[in-house]
Amino acid sequence: MAIRKIREMGDSVLNKQCKEVTEMTKRTRLLIEDMIDTMYEAGGVGLAAPQVGILKRIVVIDTTGEDLHILINPRIVETSGEQTGNEGCLSVPGKAGVVTRPNYVKAVALNEDMEPIEIEGTELLARAICHEVDHLDGHLYVEKVIGDLQDVTYDEDEEYED
Ligand code: NI
């Protein structure tokens, strides 16, 4: 188990476009394992590779604590509806803001064996997929906040933190 350092807003790695993963290597498997460990250790529900300084299109998401998704080269293929609610990010510690996202999202991706998978979710999972895919394109949720970014203490379990 290895915990990697989470990059914070202001670090230019968070504003870069990530590259597609073309083959699974030992090094990439290790990265995925470390991302999972780092996400759980930080108490987040998702983490994207650029948040640990790696410009690869890989995200891990677990919105319930027992529903881990590893998404390589994820691509959102369908959305519907709308939800407006609080969002946060491990790369923007101590802050949250209101963001509107689709209420339903379907994405295609590859799993850690580079096999095609499909994921669909509503509410928090839909929000997490959108938030993490944004990271891979160099975007942070703060760009989409309605109104002002708020100071928060993360003891409200309604908050979305990735
Ligand atoms: Ni984030």
Image (spheres, grey):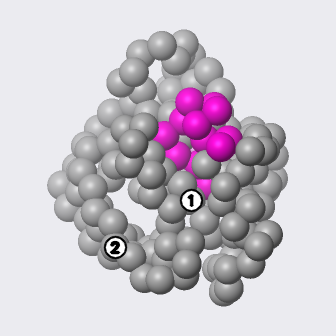
Q: Position of residue 115 (x, y in %)?
A: 47, 83
Residue 135 horizontal/vertical position (percent): 59, 56
- Secondary structure of the residue carrying numbered label 2: strand
Lateral position of residue 57 relative to residue 120, left or right: right
Disc 2 residue type (three-letter): Glu
- Residue highlighted by disc 1: 59
Residue range in magenta is 37-48
Image quadrant containing the C terminus: top right
Binning the other alpha carbons within 10 Å of mark 2 as few (below 14), some (14 to 19) or many (20 upward) gives some
In the visual, does 57 lie left or right of 79? right
Q: Residue at x 50, y 66 (%)?
A: 71
Find disc 2 in the rendering and name its residue: 118
Q: Residues within 10 Å of mark 1 (few under 14, many from 20)?
A: many
Residue occupying the far front of the picture: 1
Residue 46 sits inside the magenta stretch = yes
Can the viewer see residue 127 in this picture? no
In front of the other: 33 or 110: 33
The amino acid on which the numbered mark 1 sits, given as a three-letter code, is Val
| Label 1 CB less than 8 angstroms from ligand 1 | no
Residue under the image location 67 percent in, 55 percent down? 33
Residue 23 visible in the snapshot:
yes
Residue 102 belongs to magenta span: no
Above or below residue 73? Residue 61 is above
For residue 38, the mark is: none
The residue at the point 29 percent across, 38 percent down is: 84
Q: Secondary structure at mark 1?
A: strand
Q: Quick one: which residue is furthest to the left in this view?
A: 81
